[in-house]
Image (tube, rainbow, N blue to C red):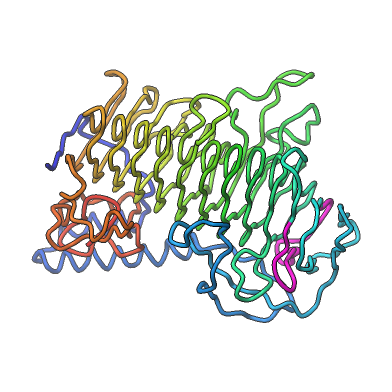
Amino acid sequence: MLVATTYKSTVKQINQDVLLGCIFYLIPLIQFDMKIKLYLLRITAGLLVIASFAMCAKQTLKVDNLPATTPSSTAAADTSGKTTDSVKMPVNTALPITTCSYTVQASQWMVDGTSIAPGSVICIPAGTRGALLFKNLKGTADKPIIIVNKGGKVNFLTSKTASYAFKTQNCQYFKITGNGASGINYGFIVDGGNIGMTMDDLSSDFEISNVQVRNSGFAGIMAKTDPSCDIKTQRGHFTMKNVSIHDNYVHDTGGEGLYIGNSFYATGVSTSCGTALPHDVVNLKVYNNTTEQTGCEGIQVGGAVSGCEVYNNIVKTPGIKPFASAQNNGIQLGEGTGGKCYNNLVKDAPGNGIIVLGLGDNLVFNNFIIRASGHGIFADSRYTPGPNFAFINNTIVSPAMSGIRLNSTSIPMNTAINNVIINPGSGQYISKMNSSVKLTSLNNYQGGDVSECAFVNFAGDDFHLQGKSPLINAGANVLSYGIVSDYYKKLRPSGLSYDIGATEY
């Protein structure tokens, strides 16, 4: 059943540039037939895809004197008993090590980078070792310091009661990558520690990739500097920026899988000198990660005020032993967080699939949310100065409660367009806390059984559409939101109109 109910006639368009506005202004004035107009629309979408990839491509940290490499993603990962089809296989652009500027010895527990030059390659030889701390690494944007495995897998092994297994303090412009040996997707294995990996004490401008983190007492990967009485740690004095966390496998953690930024952006943190506000996070990219069996959320982001994108991640069975109520969701876009959340798969969350508490410039699209025990998507107003929560082209299947639940009363507009919502346990496909919640709802598909959608193999996570699907060409035009491709990165629209849901036929 296709539902197109408009609760408010207008909605603020977001992410609409001048070019797009001009094109859509001119096309109706030209006396073309529908076929030519469609061609123009698809050409425009193609141009936006190219522009999007150009702007959102991974910011690769350039390293001097390392040879060019060819991506390889066919090698088997060390999944520690997990089936390979449950893990997003990482991109392994192996870095053949020709020269190590510095080699970490197995007996070392700390490396002070004061005398390590920008552009250096720090090698950690294969084998099992204890926890490791890096301090005062100072690369540059053009010459980051590279920390890489050499000769095989490096296993950082420590107890869950230890503070950490891998830590950085006061480090800037560096890259931690477990792709130093061909045929090994996760060259760094971080096993144990209360926090598996932690990037803190004013660490910024870094990348973490090709790392497996497991068996931590609390968070798997944590990236933040908590505010204290030291003013250098507080908002306005420190910004954690240009952070990329990708192609990692984080599982069996006591708390969050990925914990990035502070959770109390609006209210701050109580200290002995009064309330201190946590720092901003700018230009954060979290992608191609897999989290499984995490104690709390699989991915949690806070304070990411601009340039935040969370995409292409798999989050399975999060929140299995939360330390507090409402800490059992799949992906949390917490206080102070804006930006985009898209192309993610969230399965079997005991709480909400995706929870949005962000700034109000949040665009959530092309996500599959399956069997959440709370709401599929839950949105609430906390510190929300922005104009719009937009939920577009998501596919939500069998949530125990509502498909989309909106408690966001203070935001000027909530938007729900082209979503597929199947079999909500509450019987409410889209629900509002009260009449103060403003909503524009268009072209959402409401059904009782997932078989209606005609996916190729839903049980096997093949979400491509068959030609008989009622979702095809049934969606509203959402090009003005910058949505130009689907969950599989296929161009939208591919037919006469947009399809409903996360995939395009």
Relative height, residue 77 to residue 194 (above, below): below
State left or right for residue 88 relative to residue 175: left
Spot occupied by residue 308 in the image (x, y as percentages of width and height)? 52, 47
At x 37%, y 33%, the residue is: 373
- From the viewer's side, name the closer residue of 47 and 416: 416
Residue drawn at x 48%, y 27% is: 326
- Of the pair 412 and 228, the residue shown nearer to us: 228
| Residue 242 visible in image | no
Residue pictured at 56% horizontal, 48% vertical = 251
The residue sitting at 72% across, 43% down in the picture is 193
Image x and y of residue 87, in percent: 48, 58
Instruction: Estimate the x, y position of residue 212 in percent, counting from the top left.
Output: 62, 56
Does residue 226 lie above or below 370 as drawn?
above
Count of marks placed on residues? 0
Q: Is residue 419 above or below residue 23?
A: above
Task: Write down the region rendered in magenta.
Answer: 134-155
Is residue 229 visible to the viewer in this orientation of the structure?
yes
Give percent across and percent down for residue 126: 76, 68
6 left or right, relative to 46: left
Hey, which quadrant is residue 224 in on the image? top right
Give yes or no for residue 434 being in the magenta stretch: no
Would residue 359 appear left or right of 216 to someone viewing this image? Answer: left
- Res 492 quadrant in image: bottom left
Residue 148 on the magenta segment: yes
